[in-house]
Image: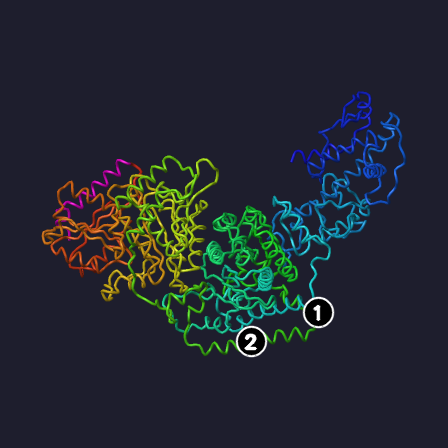
Amino acid sequence: MHRLRTTVVRLRPIAAPQTAKSQSQARLAAVGGALRTFQPMRSYTASVSAEPFLNGTSSNYVEEMYYAWLENPRSVHKSWDIFFRNANAGAPPGAAYQSPPPLGGAALGLANAQAMVGVQPNVEKLVEDHLAVQSLVRAYQIRGHHVAQLDPLGIMAAIDPGPPPSDIITSNDKLDLSGYKERLYDLTAEEFYGLDESDLDKVFRLPTTTFIGGSESTLPLREIIQRLEMAYCQSIGVEFMFINDLEQCQWIRQKFERPGIMQFTLEEKRTLLARMVRSTRFEEFLQRKWSSEKRFGLEGCESLIPALKTIIDKSSMNGVESIIMGMPHRGRLNVLANVIRKELDQIFCQFDSKLEAADEGSGDVKYHLGMWHRRINRVTDRNITLSLMANPSHLEAVDPVVQGKTKAEQFYCGDTEGNRVMSILLHGDAAFAGQGVVYETFHLSDLPSYTTHGTIHVVVNNQIGFTTDPRVARSSSYPTDVAKVVNAPIFHVNADDPEAVMYVCNVAAEWRATFHKDVVVDLVCYRRNGHNEMDEPMFTQPLMYKQIKKQKGVLQKYAEKLIAEGAVTRQEYEEEIAKYDKICEEAHTRSKDEKILHIKHWLDSPWPVCVCFFKMDGQPKSMTSPSTGLTEEELGHIGHIASSVPVEDFTIHGGLSRILKGRAAMVGQRVCDWALGEYMAFGSLLKEGTHIRLSGQDVERGTFSHRHHVLHDQNVDKRICIPMNHIAPNQAPYTVCNSSLSEYGVLGFELGFAMASPNALVLWEAQFGDFHNTAQCIIDQFICPGQAKWVRQNGIVLLLPHGMEGMGPEHSSARPERFLQMCNEDPDAYPKFSAEEFAVRQLYDCNWIIVNCSTPANYFHVLRRQILQPFRKPLIVFTPKSLLRHPDAKSNFDDMLTGTHFQRLIPDSGPVCEKPDGVKRIVFCTGKVYYELTRERKNRGMDNTVAIARIEQLSPFPFDQVKVETDRYPNADLVWCQEEHKNQGYYDYVKPRLRTTVDRTRPVRYAGRGPAAAPATGNKAAHLVELQRFLDTAFNLDAFTGQS
């Protein structure tokens, strides 16, 4: 940048005294075999009034030509001689050609040099004026959006509270001589970059960084200003000069600067009017029929509908076949009706409070529902699939979910560049600026395993939050400033100018198709009603809503404009309105015949292979889960891959070599640890054709350095090997990817990815289990109730490292109590299923599955069951930390062979089985604490009197298997033991279910840490004291004597 700024200084003419001095002190210098007698002097202290228009390479060249010409005009090409002479004479570029007069001699004499010095001020003025024009052009490109006419209400302070830039002439100023002197004087301290009133009709050569000239290379200053005003200060404001790619900046300049570029055919205008009619009349129809219903209508931003349809039309023209959309509640019904083309009668049914819901689950309010539809695009005559994702009231939460589903569809159809599948995200202005997940989602946009190759963001900019003004809702000038972090261009547009909206959306779609980058369209509009139709906005924004009440509707304004132009007649306009009104009335009549609401009619993500998965009535084709075991040969083969490097000349780390040798030794001994058990599950599913995607922070190696699914060559940068992709010739691909340091955005992304197909195992692993709480919105609003609200199954897997190991309050607990609290199972009712279907029926009825496995074999089985079971449910796995390398936490291949299954409960198989009547206590537990209990029992010699049973599947609760255990030991008291604190962990969940199992005939005692606010102590010694205390309680047979 320093070089750019000094280029102009170098080209500034040398003052007369300096020239004379340089002539007297000239020394000979050999330059290309010639003699140079002029030694230039440079002044770096001169002010630079503007950015230069030359790059570094060009400046060197022009500088050499200029100094060579000063020494000898004959030493440069004739064209340079003419240029510098005309410039010296004050002639503007583009003047008539004049042949240079013949000059003699090899060098200038002193007299000629003195004559030359006399005209130096003209050269300096010429360069300064052209630089001033360049600065003027640049000022409009950078700051023109600040004074563009963006606000339909004319209250600019609501959009940008800052003052307009002083170096831009707004279009409200008349470009006449009388009004310019004072205006130009006030623009800048240097009087408008040194330009004044006399320069308005002077012709200037246009810089290469503007396209306002069209086919002309020179324009008068007056025309330059007028064209810049038309390009940057009308209904469109363009923010793009922060983009650090010259090609992209030039592309945008062409799209907005070329004269006459925003022209529309008669047919395009008529289509636009028809779309405005549908958008406006739909809202008016709902208001007439259901005036007291909340619907979050689109009034004030009716141009959103033609905006979206324009994006879809242009994208379809560019080859896009599927578009996934996410949006908040405002305008959702209108988008469903007029963009997705949901049947109007089904929309109107949602307003009938008397209709009974046919589907199981809670359902959701009408302005949260989604929809999937495949239809012919009428403009391109091509098939297009549109999917609007269902979402909760939590604004922007759906953003990463949409991106994940988009990525999945691109993956499954082999669309590696995003040419066939794309996403559109709609936002509100307050949420776009205020919600952090927007930033997280943007930062996924260019990551290799997360990019969707460009998203079009459309902001419905109401200029207000619920009741909050922008001045207290954000610190930035615009709500869209967050998009600058990924160099996304931002197109602000006045939503009351439908043609400008249509043009901007066309450009946005072209940008995405050209550069595969994100782009933002900011529809500056207003909200005619309050936050909803029942809300009174005058309480908090009285002046704004006084203006809104006076505001003429955009449909009326645009119709009057077209009628005045002669594009349509008033009769044609009224007929278009009548035609759509009739469509709405007929749909309303049909809706009265409906008796039942079908939530499944609003499914946003139907599976492409659902015919193979469900029967016609939506029930699973089977209610049995096959064996999840493998043959000995398969286990051996996958174990061999896991313990080798299947790529030649690949150097791995020495420590990793020892790990792989250890794996090979385990395979030889027919045992596996946690990492190898996971490898067996993944490898077998891949071999069977199931795609696996594992995502999260540091998952490639594993937080605890146990996984190592990606090997790195120690000698070649960025050379990697993924052995899992070498299992079999026709296997499914394995994707393992370290994510950005985000939980909310990444978990939402993986949830969306899992929606696209049931034949994929999609896993998200938290770096530590407690980190999931920054993604709590995705868990609470999507994963837990998703099927109940929106009738969509999802098989996503959450791996949450959990365990009390003296590492402090953080990184200890994955907060299992939170997940268990949200289970939909009745703790007081024993399930009435047949023994054959008990386990599968429980799984089918639950909202999610929660497990805490204590063996690698059970972890292996539960991962395989997730795919082999005949339906999909979210799976929450509390994974271990110390057990990853615990010598006892290993499984024999016999526990993983064909015919074996996941064990919901692992009973005690020790000496207690020989004399069950003599067992005094049965301790139920889950997870890592089992190993501490068995060690303590052995140390106390109580193997015959205390049984320990592991509940591996917490939800749904294995009532049937727990009953078998309690019946086996009729004389034993029941104890639940956990390492978590009493008000945390599993106790409050397990206790009522244990009581139900034994029909409340025996009490359930507690052995564990006492209640606490923090999940764990930060003191290692205190941790060990607490551990020993609850172990003492668990094995003291008199500990509960006297308790009721």
Query: Where the N terminus falls, by quadrant?
Result: top right
Q: Dot 1: what SS?
A: loop
Q: Is residue 141 magenta?
A: no
Residue 101 at x, y = what percent? 90, 36
| First-in-chain label (1 vs 2) | 1
Q: Is residue 300 visible?
A: no
Magenta range: 1020-1044
- Say if 229 sits above or below 125 in the image: below
Q: What's the distance in space between the residues labelled 1 and 2, CA to CA?
A: 25 Å
Considering depth in this image, is 858 or 681 the residue closer to the camera? 681
Residue at (22% x, 48% y) in the render: 977
Residue at (79% x, 35% y) in the render: 124
Q: Is residue 882 visible?
A: yes
Residue 593 at x, y = what percent? 45, 79
Q: Dot 2: what SS?
A: helix
Main secondary structure found in the magenta portion = helix
Disc 2 residue crowd, few under 14, some 14–19, many 20+, Cα 10 Å: few
Residue at (86% x, 43% y) in the render: 97
The residue identified by callout 2 is: 583
Q: Which mark is residue 401?
A: none
Residue 265 at x, y = what percent? 69, 65
Where residue 192 sits, quadrant-wise, is top right
Do residues under tags 1 and 2 come within 8 Å of each other at their CB atoms? Answer: no
Residue 768 lies left or right of residue 7; in this view the side is: left
Q: Which amino acid is tagged 2?
A: Ile
The residue identified by callout 1 is: 567
Disc 1 residue crowd, few under 14, some 14–19, many 20+, Cα 10 Å: some
Q: How many marks?
A: 2
Q: Which amino acid is tagged 1?
A: Ala
Asked which colour scheme the image uses, the reply is: rainbow
- Say if 1014 sits above or below 392 in the image: above
Residue 161 at x, y = what percent? 60, 49
